[in-house]
Image (spheres, rainbow, N blue to C red):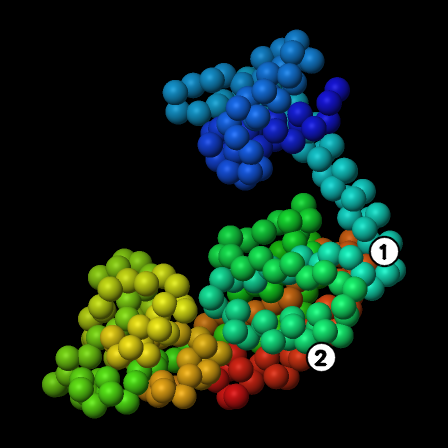
Amino acid sequence: MNWDNLKYFLAVAQNSSMRAAAKRLKVSHTTISRHIDELENQLNVKLFDRLPDGFRLTQSGSELLPIALQTDDNLLSFGRNVTGRDAALEGKLIVTFPDGMIVDLMMPYIFEFMENHPQIFVKTITSLQTLDLSRREADVAIRVTQNPPEHLIGRKLGTLHQAAYATQKYIDQHSPIDDLNTSAKWIGWGVPEERPKWKKGAVFPHLDTVGSFNNIDIQVAAARRSLGIAYVPCSQGDLHTDLIRLSEPKASFDIWLLSHADLRATARVRAFRQYIIRKIPEIELAISGRR
């Protein structure tokens, strides 16, 4: 049996559509269809019913699924264990963290780590999508979460705080602190767009929103252009001297440094974890609004 075909079988079985499976594996629909056909021909059995709304496992496909999952887990575990024996401070290290939210916070530390370890090739992936550390989509993840997965080893870096920010020009023009006479507005983000949920717990909950920008860098840019009041992480807002903080920092989510247990002995992963852990006092100051 071609074990590579199982990867495509699992992708379709877990995503229920060819399009989603193709996006996950970053291949074309034709490639996935070819591998599924090969696997069905090898086993001489039909694994999927092709329906208008997607693919559905047949009885044979349902029987193969747990076997394929176990095989995939075993291969992944073997790969992590082999990688975990690497004692050299060299090679590729993949680090992922949320796009926009903590880029300005983490990149100075990553650049310094690269200067201290020139033989380690650091690849960063900034995305709101949660990459799978078990599948080695990344070696280390810096995540904003209240519930880090139990199968990962982690260290809490601190609690992210948010506050309201605006320019002096905007404050002078719109007087946001004046509850009875103000034309001030929030720079919108989140859902529902007209009255996002976060406004209930923020200062000035009575203010309307202007636009909707689900990207923190854009929110900060809009505030600096005096478009409105931005409710953003203090690690972002405090970087800009032209922004004035209009509220006390409010705790939101925790930030965790995570990696897979099988990689704890890998030299480059261990070196990066230890380096970031030494920076925790600085990171806590920044994300709590006390920098």
Q: Using the image, determine if residue 179 lies above or below residue 140.
A: below
Residue 56 placement (x, y as % from top left): 49, 22
Q: In front: 108, or 12? A: 108
Residue 214 horizontal/vertical position (percent): 36, 61
Residue 95 occupies quadrant: bottom right
Residue 69, percent from left and from top: 67, 33
Q: Residue at x 78, y 48 (%)?
A: 80
Residue at x-position 83% and y-position 64%: 89
Residue located at (39% from left, 24% from top): 53
Vertical placement of residue 175 versus 36, above or below: below
Asked which quadrant contains residue 221, the reply is bottom left
Per the image, the residue denoted by label 1 is 86
Q: Is residue 125 above or below residue 104?
A: above
Does 19 sit left or right of 186 as displayed?
right
Mark 2 Cα shell of 10 Å, populated few (<14), some (14-19), many (≥20)? few
Residue that carries the numbered disc 2 in the rendered image: 278
Q: Residues within 10 Å of mark 1 (few under 14, many from 20)?
A: some
Alpha carbon separation for disc pair 2 and 1: 23 Å
Q: Is residue 214 left or right of residue 270?
A: left
Quadrant housing residue 4: top right
